[in-house]
Image: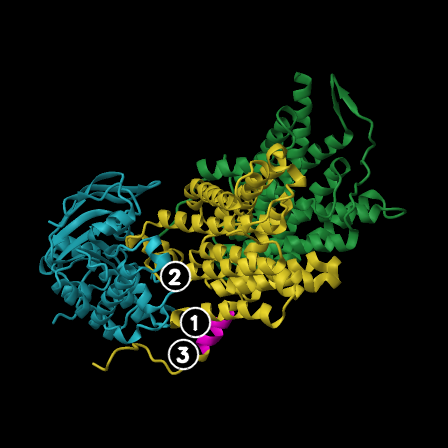
Amino acid sequence: MKRLRGWWLLAVLLAALPLIFPGNYYINVVGSSAGLFAILAVGLNLLMGYAGQISLGHAAFFGLGAYASAILTTRYGWNPWSALGAGLVLSGLVAYLIARPILGLKGHYLAMATLGFGIIVHIILVQTGGLTGGPDGIGEIPPLSIFGWAIDSDERWYGVIAVTLLLVVLLALNLMDSRTGRALRALHGAEVAAAMMGIDTAGAKTAVFVLAALTAGLAGSLFAHQQAFVSPDSFSFFVSIELVTMVVLGGMASSFGAILGAVLLTLLPELLVVFEDYEVLIFGAILMLIMIFLPQGIAGGLRDLWQSRRGLLGRKGGVGQDAA
Amino acid sequence: MLLEASGLTKSFGGVTAIADLDFLVPEGLVYAVIGPNGAGKTTLFNMLSGIYRPDEGRLTFAGQTLIGQATHQIARLGLSRTFQNLQIFFNMSVLENVMVGCHARARTGLAGALLRLPRMRREEEQIRQWAGEALDFCDLGGLKGRQASELPYGALKRLEIARALAARPRLLLMDEPAAGLNDTETLEMRGLIRRIRDQGITVLLVEHNMGLVMQVSDRILVLDYGSRLAEGTPAEVRANPQVIAAYLGGEVHYAVE
Amino acid sequence: MWDQILQFVLTGITLGSTYALVALGFAIIYNASDVVNLAQGEFVMLGAMSAIALTAGEGVPLVPAILVAVLVTMVVGLMLQRFAIAPARGITVVGTIIITIGASIFLRGLALLLWGKDIHALPHFSGESPIRLGNVTLLPQNLWVMGGTAVLVLAVHLFFNRTLLGKAILACSCNKAAAQLVGIDVGRMLLVAYGLSAMLGAMAGVLVTPITFTSYDAGIMLGLKGFSAAVLGGMGNPMGAVAGGLVLGLVESLAAGLISSGYKDAIAFVILLLVLFLRPSGLFGRASAERV
């Protein structure tokens, strides 16, 4: 299947890595982390890269999923899978409710509104100590199990996250290569024209916003069980910015670009451990430099390179017209 | 009558763009709207597409009122449009652009897209075919695989038309299709507009190129300062002294074949 | 009870003055270049931190330290426009937002590197003996903040309405091409706008830091809340921004005092969302029409 070439490559890569380097910290632990963020990034990319919207508060949905799982399993003894489901419902519902008013905004206003939303959720997580454990968070979250088989080792988490990532990417690829996907991309390309083609632009924006929120909620629940601990720090404004950076760095409108961005940004702190004091400075510098010099991200830059190679040389006007 | 307007009025702040306008567009014609800049032509198109809401008046399309309807709802009634400033989806290929045009003719929703059910795949094939036909109709068949951003201006104008036609509209609003085209391309555009009409599609045309307007239109509405100055066949409009005075000015010679 | 409220009001006006200056800075840059400068809060932080660094130990006396600090921050503002914003021509709105966020993070990292994570403060300008007005107390520094802000706002107002330079900047914001055609050097006007905003931010920082202290990450929330204030007042309306800042400060202080202090940071953002949803043009802005 030519269409899914990239997906198969990814699947092979994900499967091969732990086999070639068994028990490797970088693959199992850092890789799992990168994988979770990749899931988040792929979801956010649907919203930002394909549909052309902005969200500077995406970590809020990550947090909603995580806290739903944490609270329901630790305080109410729910089955982790049911809690995961509840987390999805919560993320999706909140997204649905705020989508219409927020996505009616454009440009700066949309960006700042999503930012405001993200901060409000974060503050609520910190302040409702009785429910969420406040700044100290919630610990001792029970592990996730599949048919009685507990996922309690780094290797197993790598497996679960890799499978989830592949599933999410598959769905994203399917979505983009469809009538709905074209409608979303049309939304980005020229919103008025999209409406003129019969596309319910408000409905489409809501749908993609909810989808992105659902993937984030899913990642959140997995995160909660993987870490066995959640605290508001993991869902702050910074994390939202990191997510946006991943999508932008990797390249908008490319699920694989989003994965690349997630991997790079997860590896960055590991690489910068030496430069610990400079970490913040460097991160800021990177953000500025990408947006100034490579606004289409790495994947976009590669795409442009590829297309200019394919040759726009020697083209005359009126291509496609036979001489009259 | 496919399109009926009566008493249409639209103001922006202190400026009245359209003032108490009436007109009737019969089905199956090429109906042109001309007038000097600022006469209200684009405002009229925007009202027809649901982008602006008229302050007063009635506007019906195939018996249904257009006022208060959202743009995408109007599109689904059978009205399609090209734009003065190209609104091509540059982030997609030529074929995909036209496939979007088929949006209203298809049904697959989110679930079908995510799961890629067989019915969805069949529909995709169908959409691809419809899009291909529209591209061929506009002489763009050879460019299917290209990115829209690679096309020259003239081809992009035709791409927008192909996209609008893929929706199989009853009424096609064309906003300055000949703008920026050279003489050869304008000649081809004339042929294309005639072919569209011959397909049974009603064309509402806003255009500055008088030669093209006179040659391709069946009826013409002349606007000035947002109101109707004259309406009739090209011959009638050409001969109307008010029109000549207000717009065409003095002696104007244009090629008539 | 009323005394308590009055106390909160006074705190609110002080707080609001800072927000007002930050919001004013936002409005000026937005007017001149259509950019929402999310590094605005960092100007406040830099102004304060630089002044503190200069006056530390046996260092420079207060007034020269403040002047130098403000100048340094202005230079940072100019560099931001010249090296981060100007090169990114033709970029999307998301793009500029991310660039300014990047700049804000960069400046924060710089401050972290230079001054660490500690909290610092400037000495009070004219002593710390509280002034009593009935049952309400006021610090002299409160008066400095309120007075200083009033002077700065007035100066900015006069600048834009009475000086040629100010009007040239306004012209740029209305129509860049037309401004160029009448001989206005748009690039230079942008630099002036950024420098001016940076100056306002730095002054705000210097004025308020004796009371509120500062640290390397003090800028973030200020910047975001300042933006909310600018939106509340009507994005692009400088005096509206000032009003928005004062209103925000008052509401935040009253809510923190009377309801709950934990959620006080959320107030600015709830207000932001409400304004954006219900009345995007803010209190004093004009609704804009989009051309198709």
Q: Colour of chain B?
A: cyan
Spatial separation of the CA atoms under disc 2 and disc 3: 30 Å
As for residue A307 lying within the magenta part, the answer is yes
Give the mark toward the camera: 2 or 3. Answer: 2
Image quadrant where residue B131 sits: bottom left
- What whole-number distance in Å separates the C-alpha atoms at marks 2 and 1? 13 Å
> Would residue C185 be seen by someone viewing this image from the given angle?
no
- Discs 3 and 1 share one subunit: yes
Q: Position of residue A217 (x, y in %)?
A: 51, 48
Mark 3 residue element: loop
Q: Which quarter of the figure has residue C279?
A: top left
Q: Are marks 2 and 3 on the same chain?
A: yes
Which three-letter amino acid code belongs to the residue tagged 1?
Arg
Question: Mark 1 or mark 2, which is nearer the start of the sequence?
Answer: 1
- The local crowd at label 3, few if under 14, some if 14 to 19, many if 20 or more residues have their Cα within 10 Å, is few
Which residue is labeled 3 in the image?
A312
Magenta range is A301-308
Q: Is residue A65 visible?
A: yes
Residue designated by label 1: A5
